[in-house]
Image (spheres, rainbow, N blue to C red):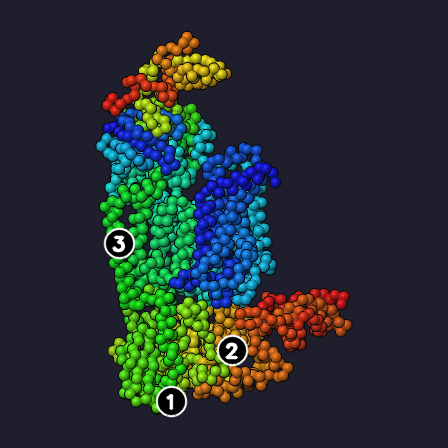
Amino acid sequence: MNLTINNLSKRYANGVRALNDVSLTIPLGMFGLLGPNGAGKSTLMRTLATLQEADEGSVFLGDTNVLAEKDEVRRTLGYLPQEFGVYPKVSAEDLLDHFAVLKGITKKKERREIVRALLEQTNLYDVRKKKLGGFSGGMRQRFGIAVALLGNPKLIIVDEPTAGLDPAERVRFLNLLSELGENSIVILSTHIVEDVSELCSRMAIINRGEILLAAEPLAAIADLRGRIWKKIIDRDELPALEEAHTVISTKLLAGRTLIHVYSESRPDASFEPVDTSLEDVYFTAMAGAHAAPGVVVTEAEAVP
Amino acid sequence: MNANFLETVRFEIRYYLRRISTYVYFGIFFALSFLLVCAIGGAFDSVSLAIGGSGGNVHVNSPYVITMITGVLSLFGVLVTAALLGNAIFRDFEAGIHPLFFTSPISRFSYLGGRFAGALIVDLIIFTSIPLGLMAATVVPILDAERFGPFRLLAYVQPYLLVAVPIIVFTGAIFFGLAALTRQMLPNYVGGVLMLIGYMLAGNLASDIENEQLAAILDPFGLNAISLATKYWTPVEKNMQMVALDGVVLWNRLLWMAVALAIFGIVYSRFKFSHVAGERKSTKARAAEAGPPAAAYAAPRRLTLPLVSRQFDRSGHLAQFSSLTWRSFRGIVANRYFFAIVGAGLLFLIFSAGQVGKLYGTTTWPVTYAVLEVLGGTFALFMLIIITFYAGELIWRERDVRLSQVQDAMPMPTWVPFLAKLAALSMVVVILQGAILIAGVMTQAVKGYFNFEIGLYIKTLFGLQLVDYLLLCVLVMLIHVLVNNKYMAHLIVVLYFIFTAFMGQLGLEHGLYQFGSDAGRTYSDMNGYGPFLVPFFWFKAYWAGWALMLAVFTNLFWVRGEETGMNWRVRLARLRLTRPALSIAGLAMLMILGFGGFVFYNTNVLNEFRTGQDMEQASVEYERTYERFEGIPQPRITGVNLRVEIYPEERDVTASGVYRVLNKTDVPIDSVHIRIPSQVEIRDLSLSRPSRMVLDDEEHGYHIFALQEPLMPGDSMSMTFQLAYITEGFPNRVSRTSVVENGTFFNSSLMPSFGYDPNLELSDDETRRKYGLEPKPRMAEVDDLEARQNTYISQDADWIEFEATVGTSADQIAIAPGYLTREWREGDRRYFHYEMDSPILNFYSFLSADYAVRRDQWNDVAIEIFYHPGHEYNLDRMIDAVKKSLDYYTENFGPYQHRQVRILEFPRYASFAQSFPNTIPYSEAIGFIARVEGEDDIDYPFYVTAHEVAHQWWAHQVIGGNVQGSTLLSETLSQYSALMVMEEEYGPEHMKRFLKYELDRYLTGRAFERKREMPLLKVENQGYIHYSKGSLVMYALKDYIGEDNLNAALRAYLEDVKFQEPPYTNSLELYGYLKAATPDSLQSMLADLFEHITLWDNRAVSATAQPTADGRYSVTLTIQAAKVRADSIGTETEVPMNDPIDIGVFAAPEDGSDLGEPLYLQKHRITSGEQQITVIVDEQPAKAGIDPYHKLIDRHSDDNVVEVGAGGGE
């Protein structure tokens, strides 16, 4: 079962074009949606999660029309929004149980089992009686994933789940997510490249409402191999170099500036080859330099 | 004032000026003010609205009316202040941005003070909309210019400053402080409710004059203080004077400003400019500081989850529904603020129950319906608040904690969350109704009343009221969902409530378009809910249809997901318009049409539906068409013989009868003009002489028979008729409460009468002008001989012979004036035949109910009280009052003309007692359940009874002509008679208390006079004059000329005019007797009391006492005296004074009473201005003063007495 997004567009009342003719096909497994803040990730995620309407285009989960048959989709959906809160005075177990009912798990015994299993799985079992108001960000995020996992969802959408987590929590959280990709479509949006590189078998990069690239991360990295070059420069050299080359990223390194440049061949001897990473793929796509054939996945190719 | 502060203020103002809601608020209050002035200014034909005593002689733009409107609107404005000031700090916490402010180099003062000042300034600007709207409306050209006085800018500015600004500042400080301190919004609502309670409590207290000062101070909004300060303002004063910032108003403002300041101070000192442990953190803030929990590092495990079955069928949805319902419900009730609101409400209830049915400061027994009315009635306002507020909370529950996205994506139909929340809200209402039940029973128990009618509690709280509330829940949910902005929705709900309150006056009177309405509802111990239940059921069924429709609508527009723009919501709604939704809407439509049709059939087909305007129109037509017949010679009724059949179950009456009529004029009468009320069906109507009906105008109830041969002077004939007064279905408002299941009471006004009746004309000059009619004098001049051909009670008869047979159902007793001569049964009906053995006025009544009877005897007069079983409380008092009245009246005025006195209880659809010949119908509301216990309690059952018995002399023996001053002869003299009986029984101290209420009633009454105030001698049937002023004047007169002297004059007058034939006596004739009995020295006083509207302003300035050589005390009293005369609209002119007035010196009071034993009490001649009086008393004086017993009419009766100080060096 695939999730197929065709020509999805959305313009907000204030004129912002959040999605512009987005088409994607997302198969089973972890799918990373990478993009800067405000790229349209959340709009896309909310649309997939039946919470937002699109101006144009269609979305199908298998045969189900996501935009029209919302109830159908919600039965197989697990959704963790980018930002969410909880009732501060309710315990984790209690609220999870409540959501279990809402997810249609009406048998008390089964509900008790799944709630217990999920709390254990998310390492919240020890604090199950605690009020949610006292939870840390990571705990709450894990609680959120427990809610999302209720009812064995086939489509799991997690919107920026790692934002604001400390490194250890983040690892813990990603581990949990990685387990999910085996039987479900898991869409993870993030602006952190590592999240995708560590987890996802497929990904798309989105900016200003448009899909810049949809690919398998490893293939995309491989494809870029030999085209990214680096150089350490002084700050004031940057304008000139930007004139001459396609600078995809700059970062500070011990007081000087490290730039990565996209080029089919080594620009000059002062540039050194780079062991390309997904970050380079991301920046290349963001810089709009990436136009290599065979990398942009067309629909036909995306079918595994 | 530092730069930071000013910057914060500027920032805050800019913030609000950018928000659309600021302008919406301004617009709403501007529009409200504008429309109010238009409405009371006569802009809309169908609208007849009066606010703050506008109308009559009070200008729409008088300072008084403007002040009142400003006050009421400011009260509603509290909602806006709560939203604005409450958010000033709270929004930082809500957005989680507060650390940014706390860590910036801004002082606590600049932050708190600046925010407060900024928001307050915006709030103050918003409420300039009130004076601006009021002013703008005055230029609307279609307004009735006669209702306006000259424009005065200050009249708008001053109320804004005096009323609106303090309310805004005070409530603003509270809302600002509560939200800043608790960092929550909920406490604000609690604060708001508490203030409302304070206000209502004050209003409640103020209803008894004993507490009104306290009430005025305690009202946090100060409106009660302003009401008190302006309570006695006459129309002229209302037009001219501004409410001054002094007295209670000043004290109130000072107190509450101090409270506001204190609250701000507390907030300032307690407000932590830092992170508070355990505070509710915003998501971002919390995420940023999340520490690594110990358990988080555990190694990942295989994700294995047990397989679960899932249910998405109906029972699955039901499970979702109940889980959500329960959770929503618990979310509301398991909260200390909920308990705070409810607890405060209940406390208020229990307190208000203490005021149950106060009359003259005396309460009634806390019978269940009365407790329910106080509790259920007063609590209704809380219920509206709670429903409105919690509807908002429920709808925003997930969004407020940012859980909505999670929940909205859950696999449940949209109706599940909607209905769950509606159900939770309903459960809250049910719980509260239960709380009222408990509070009610507790109140009764605490007050030592143990007849808990649990059945009635349940029927009222969970049957009738609950239906109303549930309907309301649906409506409020719809408003919240459609508006989709919590604060704005609250305001709109409130506006809706205001609108419904005025719908009737706006000409929208039909229950079919007032959401949730019914045909009225009054409970009576005698008749239960009686005629109100059936229409209640059908009306509510109709509104249930609407509620269902609204629910479908709400569901369609329920916000789910992130699309909140209207066009998307419309599109989504269209998607949700599925077959089930359509079929429910169809069912709803069916209910609306079906039940609505049935209601319409009842209200408009079986019954005639007439708006107030329709009725005015009918009056106008009646006057225009038939006024030309006014005063034409008509026969007069000399005998009445009736057979009246009362069918209580069907609420029908049929009557057949014969009138004997006589041409008492000196001209032949060729046509007979007969008036029969239009709601009475005429089955037969004929004269004993050859005649034919030449006019048959049923709509106006006017019928003319032309006689073949004129009825010559001195000739008589008879008129036979058969009438039916049938109840069919139910009307829009159940108004026919005179014929009911148990407790029928109607009078002769349903019977035919002769000639044009000017009493049916419109009387209000403003309304008359609307229809192009000339203003109409209220009554004919006191010496108008033509008008004196009739009594003021009947215009087609003098003294009649009366006989009636009354039939009713087997379990009831039916009564009419006269003596019971025969009683029998026919089938399942019971008949009574009554005959009167002496001539009576053409004024009689019929009653029927399932009565118990208490009998007693006074000499050869039988005393009978027909009462509702269970209402035995005051029977002994009433009998006692009858006996003592008969004692006093026969001894002082003359013999009683009947052999019997009967008192008959009737349901509380009306609350008066009325004296018919030997028959006194007496409402269950005014005496039967009175609870006279304390020493000081005024025994009003005793007093009312004495008054009604007195009418057997003053009305049924002496009756004035249809001219000014005639009610002095009946009402004032009955009032005086009752006072004398009461004084004999309870003593003069008791009289003082009673007269205090009478003084208050008189002064309040004249303040609301719409036409013109008359001197007592020319009273035009004005209750506040002939009852209240009458009591004061007669009591003073008795004091001046002596009781025996006065009674002798009354006896001589009565002897002279009793049972007289036309022309009937008038007040001038009585006045002649009074003058003759008054010594010359008091003639001017007599004139002041009767001929003029005289007000004294006597004040004790100071009093000192010095021991004399012989062990006594020389008391020197300084007084200030003045006397004014007022004209008919209250313009006062000072007149020189030279009146004998009481000067009193008193010992210290022993018990709680005001004054102790009088050590000295003598009349002194007092002249205008300041003067000193020295008297010697035997004992240590405590208080001294002028007119200490308030015998004279004085607007400031509280300054007549002062404490006696130690002797000065004078």
Give the Cα separation between the discs numbered 1 and 2.
Answer: 32 Å
Residue drawn 40% across the image and 45% down it: B485
Measured along the vertical axis of the image, is residue A205 above or below residue B642?
above
Which of label 1 and label 2 is nearer to you?
1
Measured along the vertical axis of the image, is residue B228 above or below residue B844?
above
Which of label 3 and label 2 is nearer to you?
2
Give the Cα separation between the discs numbered 3 and 2.
Answer: 60 Å
Q: Quadrant of residue B157?
A: bottom right
- Percent position (x, y) of residue A193? 38, 22
Q: Earlier in the sequence, mark 3 or mark 1?
A: 3
Identified by mark 2, the residue type is Lys
In-front residue for pair B326/B121: B121
Tell which subunit mark 3 falls on: B
In-front residue for pair B733/B946: B733
Give the Cα separation between the discs numbered 3 and 1.
Answer: 66 Å
For label 3, the residue is B589
In the image, are marks 3 and 1 on the same chain?
A: yes
Horizontal arrangement in the rendering, residue B244 relative to residue B708 (left or right): right
For label 2, the residue is B1018
Residue drawn 37% across the image and 37% down it: A13
- Percent position (x, y) of residue A64? 24, 34
Residue drawn 32% across the image and 89% down it: B710
- Quarter placement of the N terminus of chain B: top right
For label 1, the residue is B667
Local secondary structure at mark 1: loop
Identified by mark 1, the residue type is Val
